[in-house]
Each structure stands twice: as C-alpha cells, then as structure tokens.
Image (spheres, grey):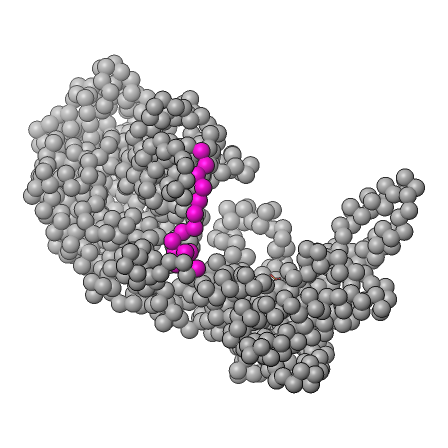
Amino acid sequence: PKFVYDFTEGNKDLKDLLGGKGANLAEMTNLGLPVPPGFTITTEACKTYLDSGEEPTALRDEVSAHLAALEEKMGKKLGQADDPLLVSVRSGAKFSMPGMMDTVLNIGLSDKSVQGLAQQAGDDRFAWDSYRRLIQMFGKTVLGVDGDLFEEALDKAKQAKKVTVDTELEAADLKKLVTTFKKIVKKEAGRDFPQDPREQMDLAIKAVFDSWNGERAKLYRRQERIPHDLGTAVNVCSMVFGNLGPDSGTGVAFTRDPASGHQGVYGDYLQNAQGEDVVAGIRNTVPLAELESIDKKSYDQLMQIMETLENHYLDLCDIEFTIERGQLWMLQTRVGKRTAGAAFRIATQLVDQGLIDEAEALQRVNGAQLAQLMFPRFDEDAKVEKVGRGIAASPGAAVGKAVFDSYTAVKWSRSGEKVILVRRETNPDDLDGMIAAEGILTSRGGKTSHAAVVARGMGKTCVCGAEELEVDTKRRRMTVPGGYIVEEGDVISIDGSSGKVYLGEVPVVPSPVVEYFEGRMHAGAEDADELVEAVHRIMAFADRKRRLRVRANADNAEDALRARRFGAQGIGLCRTEHMFLGDRRELVERLILADTEAEREESLKELLPLQKQDFVELFEAMDGLPVTVRLLDPPLHEFLPDITELSVRVALAESRQEPHENELRLLQAVHRLHEQNPMLGLRGVRLGLVIPGLFTMQVRAIAEAAAERKAAKGDPRAEIMIPLVGTVQELELVRDEADQVIAEVEAATGAKLKLSIGTMIELPRAALTAGQIAEAAEFFSFGTNDLTQTVWGFSRDDVEASFFTAYLEKGIFGVSPFETIDKDGVGSLVAAAAKAGRETRPDLKLGVCGEHGGDPESVHFFHEVGLDYVSCSPFRIPVARLEAGRAAS
Ligand code: PEP
Ligand code: MG
C-alpha cells in the first residue's frame, strides 16, 4: 500500500485513510486555498506500526521521497543550517479528538539551525523562543519528560527577570532557557535532545502513532464511542509562524455561531502567538471581528475563504489559521462541532438556502441532540443570586457542588454527589473530571478553549472565560465579585445557554422543545421560539421519511396521553404487573399463595373489575390506536414478601411467644415458592399456566373493557401479548383459553371485538423456533431486554453495576448491550426470527419493546431488519421518530 500522500494527492472523502485533518488539508489545497505544503502519513501506516511494534519498511523510503519533494518546493532543506525548513508533526484521526493526541511544532531546529532561523527572520528572540518550544514539546511528548519541569524552569526565568508573561523574556533569556531545557532532557530522558532533524521528525511521527493508545485518548474514545482500531494519521506540514511580531498571529474561526447557528463573524484571534496558544486558552484572545482593524487584507481574505468553504462543504466549518507577517495561511478546517440547538437550526437554514434537501437535513441532526434539547432549563424567574457571567460554551442547566480539581470531581461523583468542575482553564488531563462533572466552569479561555470544545463534544454544560471569578485551585476556592468566597463543596448553578453563574441551587423549568411536544408551545406562531420552529420542521421531515412506526411503553392513561402528544402511534407494551403494585399487591400475593380453589377465585374476582377499569381508561386514552397489553410477567419474588424479613418476624414472634400462625404459614409458602434465579423461574407464561384463572381473568378484563368502549362508540384496538414464551405449545394452551373467554364476552355483550393475540420473543428458544411460534401468533414483539439477558447469560439486574465497567475498559464492547442492541449476537437472532416468522405468516406484525426501542443506533438496526414498529418510553418517542426518519433517508 501507499503510506504517504502529499496534500495535493488527497481529498475530503479519504478520512479513513488520511484522518479528518489530513483529508481536509488536501481538500483545501485542491481548492487553491493557502495551505502550507506538506504530506500525510496514513492511518494504515499507524495501524501496521501499532500491530507489529515496528514501522513498515516502505514507510521510511516514502517519507524520504515526500520530504525531498517538500524541500524542493520550499527551496530549503529540513533543518538546513543557514535557512532551515521547519515542520510540524500533528496527529489527525478520522474523528476529531481535541487535544487527546500529540503534536510537535518547529521540528528541524538545532543548535546550528536556530542561528540560521534568527538570521532569516531577522529576529533572535523569535528563533530562540521557537527552539525552546521545540525542546519543551519534544521533551514532553516524544521523550516522556514531565512537562511541569519545563514550566517550572520557565517560571523561574520569569521570576529572575521580574516579568510575568513569556513575551517579556528576551533572546538572551531564552537562549539560557534552551540550555536549561536541554539539561532537563538529558537528566530525565537519559539522552541528549537530538540535533539531527530527520531523527527529530522520525521520533515525533512514532510518538504520534503511540499517542493513539495513550490513556487520555482511550478514555476519550470510550466516552465518544469511537472504535479503538482506527489509528491516527500523521500530518507533516511546513511551519508558518504567528509569533513573528504584531503583524503575525493565530486564530480560530467558525463560518456560523456554533452555539446558535446564526451566520456572522465568530472566532478568536491572538496576535503574535503560535499554534496551540489559542486553543489552550493561555492568553486571552480578541474577538475575530477585531482582526478587521488589525489586518484588513487578511481579514477580507479570510471572510472570502470562509464563504468558499461553506459553499463547498455545505455546512458549518471551523477553521484554524495563522497570519505570518501579513500572509494568511489555513492550517485546518473541518465540519464544525456545534450545540444541539444549532444543529437543528443550521439544518433548516441550509434547506432554506437551497444548499441541502430534507433527507440531507435529517443527517445533520441526531436523536442524542434532540434528547439533549429536551432537558429542563433554569427558571429565569427564580430568585437567585447571579455572581458572574462567562461565555455560553455548551448549553444545559447544571447544578452541583463546586470542586476545583479533576481528582475530587471523580471521587465525589463516584460517591453519588453532583459536582461542577471549576478550573481556571482545563487541559486534556482534566478529561475524567469533566466526564464525572455535571458541568464545567472556567475563568479563562474563549469559545474555542479546551473546556468549551470538549464539553460541546460531550454534550456537557459548560461556561468558560468567566473572568470576574477568581479561581484559586491551590486553596480550592473561588472569589466572586463583591468578595464572597465559594469554597469546595458549596453548591453553584451554571447555565451553559446564557453563560450565567449562580450561587446555590437554581430551580429548573421544562425545555421549550418539551413544551412544544406537549402542545403548550406552537410552531408557526409569530413569536415562536426559533429552536422550536426548527425542531418542528425536522420532525415533519422525519415523519414523512420514516417507515417504522413508533409506539410507547405505557401502562396508565396519563403516560399514554403524553405518549400520544409526543407522536406515539399506539402502545407497544403495557406491562400489567405495574397495575398490580401498590395497594393491589396484597391481592396478588393472596392469589399466588392461595391454598384452595375458593381462595384463588375470591382474589381473582376482586382483581377483575380493577383490571377492567385500568383498560377502559387506557383504551380511551389511545382511542383508534393499537394497544398491546401484555399479560402478567413478574418474576415471582417481586410479588412475595421478602423471605429474610418474614423469617425475622416469625423468629421474633416465636421468642416472644406471641401467636404467629399466619406468618408461619406464609413463610412456608414463600419457602416453597422461593427461587434462586427468579428471572429464569416461574414468570411470564409459566405463571399463567400454573395459576389457573390468572390469564383468563386478564383476558376477560381486556375483552370486557373493549366491549364497554365499543358500546360508548369508542374505537378500542387491543392486542393481547403473551410473555416469555419458549415453545409454541405454551402459546397454544393460553390461546385456546383466551379465545374461549373472548367468545364468551362477545356473546354476552354482542360486540365484535377483533382482539389479536401474539407473543413476545424474548428467549433464544422462541427466536430459534419462530417459524413454529408464528403458527399461533398474529404478532411478535421482541423483548430485547430479556433476550439480551438470556443470549449473553447476563443478569440484567446485576451486571451493569458489577463487571461492565471492566468490560468496557477492556474494549470487549464499546457500549452496554442492554443500551444498544448487540447486532452480531442478539440482533442476528432478531433478524432470523423475523424472517422465519414471516415465512410462516406473511402478514405477521413485528415490533420491539425492549429498552433498545428508544436507542438511536438500535432504531436504525430495527429499520434495516424490517420490523414494523419500535416501542419505547414516552419521553424517547420524539428521538425514535427522528431516528426512524434518519434511518430511512
Ligand atoms: C423485554 O424483556 O425486553 C421486555 C420488554 O419485557 P420486560 O422488560 O418487562 O421484561
Ligand atoms: Mg421481558
């Protein structure tokens, strides 16, 4: 294979091979934009290296050839003593992983070439500053030297000079610092800082490869669900300098506001600075608009380029650029990250501009973003004390105890506390603290600082650059205007949509998007919320496109009505055991423990009218839409008294010589029915078959309720579902009884009920014999919770808390199979059962009602295998509708 591509050889569609950065640098080069020449080493080279521990042999030769071409183009050689070509070596994976992997700038500088650079630039200070940066970055990332040692030496140099910022150090100071840095390298790494420029480059390339498997990078990938086997590309790019004086600088820009989606001039600029200074949030930047007065020519050119990029990528782009002595250079672009709200607005704006169509608009948003928009927000009318305001970097309303370091954030959140991570600025080492926190607050840095970029990526609330707050991480506190001190553990609230910071806990109100779904806010009204408008339109696109229907898991009228407002097209799962909890539990307990026929019938008779009323209400709420009622499926222990508690009661009564006959009888019964593995025990259809009259009572309640609704001119569409079936015989037995009861009710009421009877497929045996089961079922609903439990042999109640973290860390799976359907295992069983079922009965209706029905990735899978509907909790319905639409477009 070819391992190295010149920027002129690639294009934006080669992200798998060239990484996002490399592919887009190539694309910009081909668009004729000013990109410093360079080349990209492919992810294939990285993977080969990581697999074998050695760089592929062809790589070295290819790098040599491309370097020679680059030197030829630039008219100078890498590290050439009198006029050195310098390069940056940057990581760049397929998916952006901000700050997670390594980058080394200024490669090619040495004791000799630093003189040449000084002469060429006419600037000694600049040359020595570049050299000390190289040793520092190279020492830290390539040679593994503790970065603090360099920082401390830099601080000492500043103290000695009695200055506070780096820029006040002069050439002579920096030259001394270079000597100190080299000593640090020698002592810590046990070798000299390499003077051979090619050696510098080769080591840096290897370090970038290795950084793919750094701890930070692995953690980030798990969080973002990025596969671990993609590898990173490496970009070798000729250096341009933003730190050559006031006519130089570096910045970042967005073609639209990544928070609101509005078009305009958004970004940050830092004069006389190099590379990472902006993103690291070390010095404060100026808004991009000010570049117009600093350097009008570059500003105009940048605006022109931004327009070109938007029209080319048909999306919001973000850009990194550098100005070297009045010459603008593009260092990076990509389709930019954005807030959830902006994603919806931008997608509809682009449709209105005629740049994309509806199907494409659906690809520009996703269910996770929609779910995020449905979170509650702070109540603006609440009486609260605002103490600061920063930049609204990533939306949401977060409340928690202030903590000032990542370690505490993780520790406290593990013990169940909600925390807000407060830092002056964050850096990649803060990642696990950011994940643990409800929100992130920083006192420095702009919209593109590390905190902002990472928080947005994670969908986590973030306020950054709240400059009035004085954060003192050493003493674990911050001082707010007016002198009040927030100590570690004090509750604060941050609003990532407005940038406001409050003392104490601010009450929250529902999001406008939920108000819209609830019908309390209308799209199309004159003062309609822009966001609601966009969501409304995107949902309409999705509903037009989707083939999957979306139903709700609901077992009472209130949930059913909400589900309906959210767009549910029926109920896919009414769990009747939920109707038996509370004060009715005792009735069920009596039923299960009944010794005599008479006792059993007594409790069934009491339950019947209660059940019937439940169904009347449910059918009324869902009038005209299907309602799948599942017959009772509790693991038995959920309805029996706790065995330990009962034993203690009996023992106590015994020792006190109090009467305890009833308790004793109960205890004996509980012992008799006690199970080691209730989830694999007497539940579902098995319970129905061994407790005479239980299922028929439920069927009668359903049939009578339907007849009553018919009589009231309603349109009930009940479907009866039998749980935990493993063989068609079980289903046939229940079916025969049910048919009889339905016929009785029809005869008694004169109503024609048309109740269909189907089953859940939630055991491997049911899936494997789906062809037979379909003989007796009019529909299947896949119970992927139990199916996952039984296919993997994972107890659904235990494993997530016990060993899943270890499994996730080891990469055995990237996400819990209880959250996203395991396509290869459980999913293939679903697909095969669906196929076999339809072979027996071509009009077999197919749905899914496990938790996966509301999970975006799983919805796409169910679309692909041809199910008719997914059923999920009411709040997930909009997400499922959207994802079903995306799956079909
Ligand atoms: C299932 O098993 O997927 C299901 C929907 O049933 P329950 O969660 O009630 O067991
Ligand atoms: Mg189940």
Q: Quick one: which residue is furthest to the right in this view?
A: 657
Question: Which of 190 and 310 lies nearest the eye of the viewer?
Answer: 310
Q: Quadrant of residue 174?
A: top left
Instruction: Please tell me how many numbered marks the rendered image carries.
Output: 0
Answer left or right for 569 relative to 117.
right
What's drawn in magenta, residue-wise?
504-518
Quadrant in the picture for the N terminus: bottom left
The x and y percentages for residue 827 are: 52, 66
Where ligand 1 lies, by image quadrant? bottom right
Q: Residue at position x 67%, y 82% from top?
A: 749
Q: Residue at position x 87%, y 53% from top?
A: 662
Q: Residue at position x 58%, y 50% from top?
A: 800
Question: Which of 321 and 13 lies nearest the eye of the viewer?
Answer: 321
Up-down: is 754 above or below 128? below
Q: Is residue 372 visible?
A: no
Q: Is residue 513 magenta?
A: yes
Up-down: is 804 above or below 277? below
Answer left or right for 56 relative to 354.
right
Quadrant in the picture for the C terminus: bottom left
Answer left or right for 295 relative to 735.
left
The x and y percentages for residue 124 are: 13, 25
The x and y percentages for residue 386 are: 36, 33
Question: Which of 16 and 714 lies nearest the eye of the viewer?
Answer: 714
The x and y percentages for residue 242 are: 16, 36
Q: Residue at position x 61%, y 81% from top?
A: 753
Q: Is residue 459 visible?
A: yes
Q: Is residue 818 magenta?
A: no
Up-down: is 263 above or below 769? above
